[in-house]
Amino acid sequence: MNNNFTSIKKRIEQILEPFLHQLQQAQSFLENNPEFLDNLKRYIENWPKFYKDDWLKMAGYGWFINWETPITVTKALSVSQDTLDQFMTRHLTDAWPNITERIIELYPERAHILLESFKLHQDENYIACIPLFMSQIDGICAQNLSVFLFSEHERRLEKTQELINDSRGDLLNVFLEIISTKTQFGASISSYSNNKKKIAPNRNGVLHGSRKHLDYGTRINSLKTFPF
């Protein structure tokens, strides 16, 4: 019996040894870096503020974060617009099932339209799904903020500032600040240069059928207008 206990004890010690070693390393690190925990606490409390400028820059390139966007997107952003485009395309493609399911859960009254638009995207019918995405983004924004995303810029600024003043949530405030910025999505129809259209599809040009914006039907534009 004693031999069995000895064998069990030895096995447990073997299993715990790596964890004990890691704990010793952690203890040593904290002793040599006493400011680490304070810095970590400060980061946890303020992390949305740390990424705000990057997220605003992403919006300028036609991309908006969602609840599954990895923080590592900032590394792609620091390289180039093309790298960011590739990163977000992979991310949204991989996370598509989870994100679409969550959107339907949040807005079940829109399910019949959203499901159809999702199917159109999956069928690569981008010409058809992009206008649907744009209309639903506008409607979802109005449903949550009582102001349309694309067509009421000045009122949107006023409304988002009111919400920011009333809110204590840093993440919500950063998000509100992002959607209050002007982007290529809501620019005038005259914003049709190739460089501008590379950033994002123009909502006014697409929905009003401008002959300057007939080339909007691409996969990347569909992902950029995806209503998260």
Image: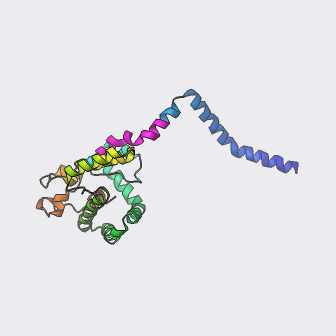
Residue at 38% across / 66% down in the picture? 104
Magenta residues, as a range? 41-57
Residue 63 coordinates in the image, percent (x, y) = 30, 51
Residue 45 shown in magenta = yes
Residue 217 shown in magenta = no
Residue 142 coordinates in the image, percent (x, y) = 27, 59
Q: Is residue 200 left or right of residue 193?
A: right
Residue 135 coordinates in the image, percent (x, y) = 25, 63
Residue 85 coordinates in the image, percent (x, y) = 31, 51
Residue at 20% across / 54% down in the picture? 152
Q: Which quadrant holds the C terminus?
A: bottom left
- Where 109 falls versus 56 (above or below)? below
Q: Is residue 71 left or right of residue 28?
A: left
- Where 114 falls versus 194 (above or below)? below
Residue at 74% across / 43% down in the picture? 13
Q: Main secondary structure of the magenta part?
A: helix
Residue 34 vs residue 143, the one in the foreground: 143
Picture quarter containing residue 79? top left
Answer yes or no: is residue 191 visible. Answer: yes
Residue 118 vs residue 15, the one in the foreground: 118
